[in-house]
Image (cartoon, helix red, strand yellow):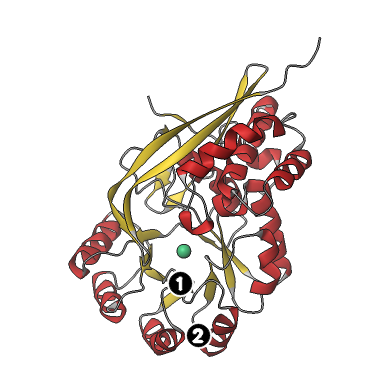
């Protein structure tokens, strides 16, 4: 019997955060996410595209390129072939679309084997590091409330968004609200070199565990200089877009924030993770604002990382998937077949 090629379908849903989510560049409440399904032989693998304008993607680019890629996925088991086909058609572009397709292929294979994706990939059954919970940029009073509420729910690691004229006051206020938590800082590329140097002492005094992307994405020299003066580890997020960036980043940063949606999927993220380790970098498994499907995919790899930042779906008011088991910031590794999440009824 002739083999019928897999069928690819997708639909976009607007997801909403429970509260407006603010970082140095913008504040949003609505996030269009495109869900891809690969069906073949009675099984359906699923993926999520979480486009981010910083990496050149929007809902429009995702929906425009997907029809051009439907025939790139001819055999769910041919992962190298999928990567080659997608790279040939979209070199260095559309990482969240590549992620959705890679996720769908991997889940289809895991379902056909009846195992979770992490087992399909032969990954070590390690526990996940505790995930941070984000205190997003808002008024000082609102940020205090966010921190107080998160601590009240049992979170032990907070990641505070900075990049304002009152960063010092925000840190002081949060330390007052939450003296015991591990505090991480994300400036989202908003500080100047002079500002960052001035704030290093403040970060150390506030016992900040790490600082993410203090300077502009392209400023590797500035990050290298900052790192040489800093007692707080400096982690690249916006500076890391492609797997191939890792080698250069190792000279300027202590660690990297790996996100499936910007690196092109779980397999590309695993490549980045190995490369980061080989170059002595610490690794964070991060996420976009995305549903529990996208978070689940990151959770399958997060046991290999030093830090986790997987609160994207916890911030949503209308997460379309369920099945992840959270206890405050502790996410259990998914154990069901595939990604281990199901549509919310
Ligand atoms: Mg970040």
Quote the CA–CA distance across marks 1 and 2.
Answer: 19 Å
- The location of residue 157, given as percent across then percent down, is 40, 63
**Residue 207 occupies which quadrant of the picture?**
bottom left
Q: Residues within 10 Å of mark 2 (few under 14, many from 20)?
A: some
Left or right: 138, with 333 as reference point: left
Task: Establish if 240 lies above or below 268.
Answer: below
- The location of residue 107, given as percent across then percent down, is 62, 33
Q: Nearer the viewer, residue 143 or 178?
A: 143
Left or right: 93, with 162 as reference point: right
Q: Nearer the viewer, residue 57 or 184?
A: 57
- The location of residue 165, given as percent across then percent down, is 29, 79
Q: Nearer the viewer, residue 281 or 129?
A: 281
Upstream in the sequence, badge 1 or badge 2?
A: 1
Q: Find disc 2 in the rendering and name its residue.
A: 231
Please tell me which residue is depicted at 25% across the width and 60% down the height of the picture: 146
**Residue 76 occupies which quadrant of the picture?**
top right
Q: Residues within 10 Å of mark 1 (few under 14, many from 20)?
A: many
Q: Find disc 1 in the rendering and name its residue.
A: 189
Mark 1 vs mark 2, foreground winner is 1
Please tell me which residue is depicted at 71% across the width and 34% down the height of the picture: 72
Tell me the quarter of the image containing the N terminus. Answer: top right
- The location of residue 193, given as percent across then percent down, is 46, 85
Q: Decide if residue 115 is in sight here.
A: no
Q: Decide if residue 153 is in sight here.
A: yes
Tag 1 near tag 2, CB within 8 Å: no
Q: Nearer the viewer, residue 66 or 285?
A: 66
Element on which disc 2 rests: loop
Left or right: 299, with 183 as reference point: right
């Amino acid at each position: 019997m002739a083999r019928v090629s897999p069928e690819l379908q997708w639909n976009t849903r607007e997801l909403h955060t429970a509260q407006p989510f603010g970082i140095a560049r913008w504040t949003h409440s609505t996030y269009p996410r495109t869900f891809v399904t690969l069906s073949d032989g009675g099984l359906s693998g699923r993926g999520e595209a979480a486009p981010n304008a910083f990496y050149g993607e929007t809902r429009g680019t995702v929906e425009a390129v997907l029809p051009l890629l439907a025939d790139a996925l001819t055999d769910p088991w041919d992962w190298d072939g999928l990567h080659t086909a997608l790279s040939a058609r979209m070199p260095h572009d559309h990482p969240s679309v590549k992620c959705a397709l890679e996720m769908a292929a991997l889940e289809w294979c895991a379902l056909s084997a009846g195992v979770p994706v992490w087992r399909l990939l032969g990954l070590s059954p390690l526990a996940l590091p505790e995930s941070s919970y984000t205190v997003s940029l808002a008024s000082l009073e609102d940020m205090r409330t966010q921190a107080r509420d998160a601590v009240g729910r049992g979170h032990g690691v907070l990641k505070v968004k900075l990049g304002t004229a009152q960063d010092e006051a925000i840190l002081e206020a949060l330390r007052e609200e939450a003296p015991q938590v591990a505090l991480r800082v994300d400036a989202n590329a908003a500080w100047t070199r002079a500002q960052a140097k001035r704030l290093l002492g403040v970060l150390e005094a506030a016992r900040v565990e790490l600082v993410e992307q203090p300077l502009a994405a392209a400023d590797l020299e500035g990050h290298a200089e900052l790192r040489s003066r800093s007692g707080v580890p400096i982690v690249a997020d916006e500076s890391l877009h492609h797997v191939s960036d890792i080698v250069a980043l190792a000279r300027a940063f202590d660690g990297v924030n790996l996100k499936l949606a910007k690196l092109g999927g779980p397999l590309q993220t695993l490549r980045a993770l190995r490369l980061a380790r080989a170059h002595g970098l610490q690794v964070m498994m991060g996420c976009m604002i995305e549903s529990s499907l996208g978070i689940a995919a990151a959770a399958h790899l997060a046991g290999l990382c030093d830090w986790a930042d997987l609160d994207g779906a916890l911030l949503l008011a209308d997460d379309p998937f369920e099945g992840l088991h959270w206890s405050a910031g502790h996410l259990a590794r998914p154990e069901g077949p595939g990604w281990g999440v199901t549509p919310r009824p």
